[in-house]
Amino acid sequence: MNNFRYFPNSKRDIAKLYRILGIKDKKELFGKILGGIPLIDGGILKALPEELGEEALYRFFLDIDSNIPAKSRTAVFAGGGIYNHFVPSAIDGLISRSEFYTPYTPYQPEVSQGTLFALFEFQSFIAEILGMDVVNASMYDGAESLAEAVLAAMRLSSANRDMPVSHKDDIILISDGVNPSYVSVIKTFAGGTGVKIGKVKLNGRTGRTGIEDLKQKLAGGGGRVPAVVVQQPNYFGIIEDLEALERLVHSNSNSGYNPGLIVSSTEPYSFGVINPPGYYNADIFAGEGNSFGNYMNFGGPLLGLFAAKKEYVRQMPGRIVGKTKDGKGRDAYAFILSTREQHIRRGAATSNICTNSSLNAVRAAIYLSLCSKSGFKEIASLNLKLAHILRDRLLSSGLFEPLYDGDFFNEFSLKLKINGNKNNNTTASEFIEKMAERGIIAGVAVSESALLISATENNRLSDIEKYAENAKEVLNA
Amino acid sequence: MPKFPGIKGIFLDEDPLIEQGSKGLRGIGIPDCGLKKSDLKKDESEYIDAKYIRKSPPELPEVSEPTVVRHFTRLSSWNMCVDTVFYPLGSCTMKYNPKINEKIAALENIKNLHPLTPARLIQPALKIIDDFNNILCALTGLAEFGFAPQAGAAGEFAGLKIIKKYFDLKGENRKKILVPDSSHGTNPASSVLAGFVPVEIKTGKAGTLDAEELKKFISKDVAGIMITNPNTFGIFEKDIKKIAEIMHKNGSFVYMDGANFNAFLGSARVSDMGIDLIQLNLHKTFSTPHGGGGPGSGALGVVESLREFLPVPYVKKFGGGVSADKNFKRPVYELSEDKKNSIGRMTPFLCNFAVVLRAYAYLLSLGRENIGSVSEIAVLNANYVKKKLGKILSGSDPFEEGFCMHECVFSDKAIEESGVSTIELAKLLIDYGFHPPTVYFPKNIHGAIMIEPTETESVRTLDNFIKAVKEIKFKTKKSKAVKSPQKTKVGRVNEVLANKQPIFKYLV
């Protein structure tokens, strides 16, 4: 036993504890408790290095940090579900307050008003951005949130919502424009219910979800359709015609049920420029909120957003903060409608979620406050313009051709032109690898020859020029 | 020095930000990105079809940076947290969150790393996952961990999906998961989500599962058991090996809810208890901050026979020491989807990397010399509280005989005699400057009060807490109890009203 700096009990304190408990040492204590289970010995612990002092530990990670692409020398044009947005310092300053990052879930509202109020503001801001009635206090990430949305829609489609029902005759229609990783997560979650997954093809020219194909699939008799899932903008960056999709989905009752419309998004920043899902009468929105004040962090933690029409609130997963009063009539905040949740309803809960992405949500609330009404719109607009300038620049180089011609926000997809490069056979992945060596994260490969490219306010015109010049060198080498 | 931390001073009030705005203000600097003025001025409809364009921007507050900073700083001051108070929340392991871990997670390149950056350029980041996996395997005795689960409940879900898939592939239709009645609510909820029917087993008088009782539930329909160990009374499941034998003999699995792993960290391996799967809550045992409700990580460990079922993608290591091939002298890490029976994907990218990073830093800080002290001191502290409080709350310790592990639980028997209910005790403790313990859980203890001190509290703090409980028991008037807490930003919150007329957002 030694005095490690995280342990506030001294050797004397520990000796005192043993004395009070009438126990000699650890061996006796654990022996009495664990019976035949052996204590870990030194051999097993060899897998763990010897204690690293704070300075040595920091240098260890500093070394790792300096052997990965340096932010200062890297232009990131990759999106594909996570975007390289600017994070104002005020967020880090505020979030580094222990009062925000070291408490537990605010189950004791009187001593958690700070987190609860901040989450209430988060819900308010996100509801405004999405144009939706009710937003919850966060999910893990966009994909998990979307999978839970599908499950919620399936419950809503059942006559008896409290009973687990078989969904063997149900089919969820998912547009090919939904991020493929999200579709995989939906399959992981919905797999056990027996529900089938049907795909809706994209229009080969525009890249938008094919209206004709959707019409056929809805009429197709593959089963009852609890919900149709689309993404806005879609995986390929294309802005979906939600007006047309909504009309088709909600007016369809071929299977005796009007399907719900679930809209996802990996880039809700787009709703600073384009109409939000609520404007088009979406039933549920489930997507990613990482773009709001959160770092990319190599892909996690992320910020799952979940929103719905208010009539569906009782089928929503996760925690919701509501405004109320205390005994003296002062404004106060608390979790509400907890009877949906696992700690009350156990097996009959709407979800198993407990820990969520609370701190990421508070970051988003701070971020959106800083952006304010005008800033949010202007940054969104800047994204739109930069992406269009980048696409024009790349197309004019003659090395690329468009994959689709539909309207887009800050992300688009291009094909490497056949015969556009000397080798003729540089794949999208090889192109991305070679560009990465030159300090440009050029995009995300979506096929052998096509890639997704995005631009944000963190890219400058000079980065765009650098992209175009390097692409020329890489592809003509 | 005051006897109790208490609460003195002033609470600064704060209006919603939306009410503090003034037209045109904002708190962010917007770059021009080198764009020409003419481009900056262009209307969005010059880029996309006007029918998509949003006419009215979202009503966000219009406020400057100082206003935002003051607002959220004031809000933060209304929270109790681990850094300000003793936070003895049972089953939640509210231990100290080391500051160096925050500094590491804030390293510029790591936090700005795009998850789809080519693997060749990010080898050191991928190596972190592999190294961390190796340490967790040593500490648990299991074969491999999957890092996709974003929190404890997600880990449970992943583990149960694996069990489900295992039997599906074997062509066995096993429907039941056995769950003790004292389990966390997530256990039955995760079982249902994974397509199982949870079946409750009653806990025995000693607070543990009885192997003989378990036998009554065994049939070929049982896929596994979800067992929390130490259980939610803080008591070690003495029969665990016997239970595992019974389950294994039936071809069933033993899933351990690892929420309470702090009791074992560095001292005992779950493989020695016959456990097949466990999720480790990195935001509990491994010191990463709870963040007021998240994020977390629920890394899922499995035995050898279930490795191929883990979620994808995962970090795969090639070469490194064993191969004679020169090219493989240095190990190479890749993000791989190659797990032939994988339950699939759970998250868009790899894992909650920034959480794993902190947990890894925590283990490296402790090192092999100190890690065993975590569970040792945690268990000592809990038993100290159990013994001392047991005297004050006489007749309230349902498991007076024997030792608890990392937490202890009391019923409301003694405080009820003094006219104080469990919820009143919880709220009264706030005015003494302590976060309340977990209350009314587990459900099978009347008015349960569940206390988990962790290894990062001193005897001195525990003594103060015990003194506070003593004062409450012997000196509190009912009239005061019902009105507590009184020193907080707001008093007892009207939850009935909150649920009757729900207000989900600002009414703009």
Image (cartoon, coloured by chain):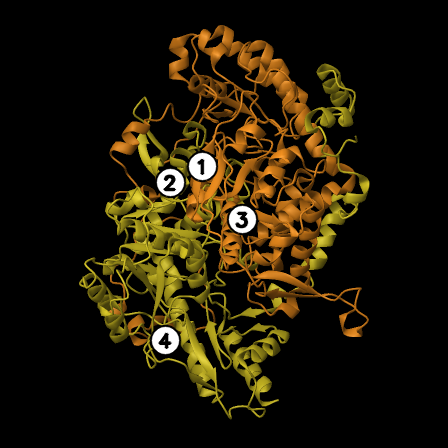
State which chain is coloured orange: B
Residue that numbered label 4 is attached to:
B38
Asked if badge 1 and badge 2 are on a common chain, one would say no
Disc 1 to disc 4, C-alpha distance: 68 Å
Q: Which mark is residue B214?
A: none
If you read the primary sequence from the N terminus, does the residue marked by circle 3 or circle 4 appear first?
4
If you read the primary sequence from the N terminus, does the residue marked by circle 1 or circle 4 appear first?
4
Asked if badge 2 and badge 4 are on a common chain, one would say no
- Label 3 neighbour load within 10 Å: few <14, some 14-19, many 20+: many
- Label 1 neighbour load within 10 Å: few <14, some 14-19, many 20+: some
Q: Mark 1 falls within which chain?
A: B
Asked if badge 1 and badge 3 are on a common chain, one would say yes
**Horizontal relation, residue B359 to residue A169: left or right:** right
Amino acid at dot 1 = Val
Disc 2 to disc 3, C-alpha distance: 19 Å
Residue that numbered label 2 is attached to:
A349
Asked if badge 2 and badge 3 are on a common chain, one would say no
Which residue sits at x=42%, y=40%? B71
Q: Do the CB atoms of the residues marked 2 and 4 lie less than 8 Å apart?
A: no
Residue that numbered label 1 is attached to:
B199
Query: Would you place residue A399 above or below residue B458 in this image?
Result: below
